[in-house]
Amino acid sequence: MECFFESFGLPTADFIKSFKETFPGPKSLIALSPDAGADRLRKIHKGHPYTNQALMDCLDQLERHGVTVMSSSPLVFPSKRQRTSSRPFSSKRRFGSVTPM
């Protein structure tokens, strides 16, 4: 059985484990949308904000359980402060194995 699950927040470790056990198919995946690379902007614009560290920890859990991840995120996010708005999400190390939308 396969499933596409779009998570508006970050899935918990228990959810990730249960998801993999319930939907082990190769096309099953969890979609995450960080919306911004800066914690501050995510807190302003996202209904369920989380830190970059929490996102990295979640990605580690997903990888550990062999769950495919799809990510949709703008390269930049509008802001009044040029310094923040021109900074894309900077974790290419982790997102190299993530399927872009």
Image (spheres, rainbow, N blue to C red):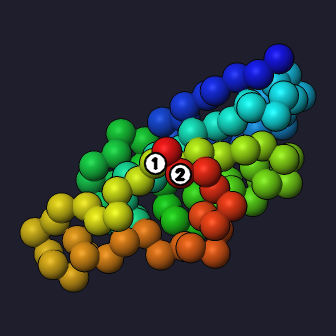
Label 2: few (<14), some (14–19) or many (≥20) C-alpha neighbours in 10 Å: few
* Element at label 1: loop
In whole angstroms, how far apart are the C-alphas of marks 2 and 1? 6 Å
Q: Is residue 13 visible?
A: no
Q: Is residue 4 left or right of residue 49?
A: right
From the image, state whether disc 2 or disc 1 is nearer to you. 2
Numbered tag placed on residue 72 in the rendering: 1
Name the residue carrying label 2: 100
Identified at 69% across, 36% down, the residue is 29
Q: Give the x, y percent position of residue 75.
A: 35, 64
Labelled pair 2, 1 in contact (Cβ < 8 Å):
yes
Label 1: few (<14), some (14–19) or many (≥20) C-alpha neighbours in 10 Å: some
Numbered tag placed on residue 83 in the rendering: none
Identified at 56% across, 73% down, the residue is 92
Q: Is residue 56 left or right of residue 72?
A: right
Identified at 55% across, 34% down, the residue is 7
Q: Give the x, y percent position of residue 43.
A: 34, 55
Residue type at mark 2 is Pro
Identified at 79% across, 54% down, the residue is 63
* Element at label 2: strand
Task: Please state the total of marks drawn on the protein image.
Answer: 2
| Residue occupying the far left of the picture | 80
Residue type at mark 1 is Ser
Q: Is residue 88 visible?
A: yes
Q: Quadrant of the N terminus?
A: top right
- 10 versus 40 height, above or below: above
| Residue occupying the far bottom of the picture | 83
- 85 versus 48 height, above or below: below
- 71 versus 82 height, above or below: above
Q: Earlier in the sequence, mark 2 or mark 1?
A: 1
Q: Give the x, y percent position of residue 69.
A: 65, 46
Quarter of the figure with residue 98: bottom right
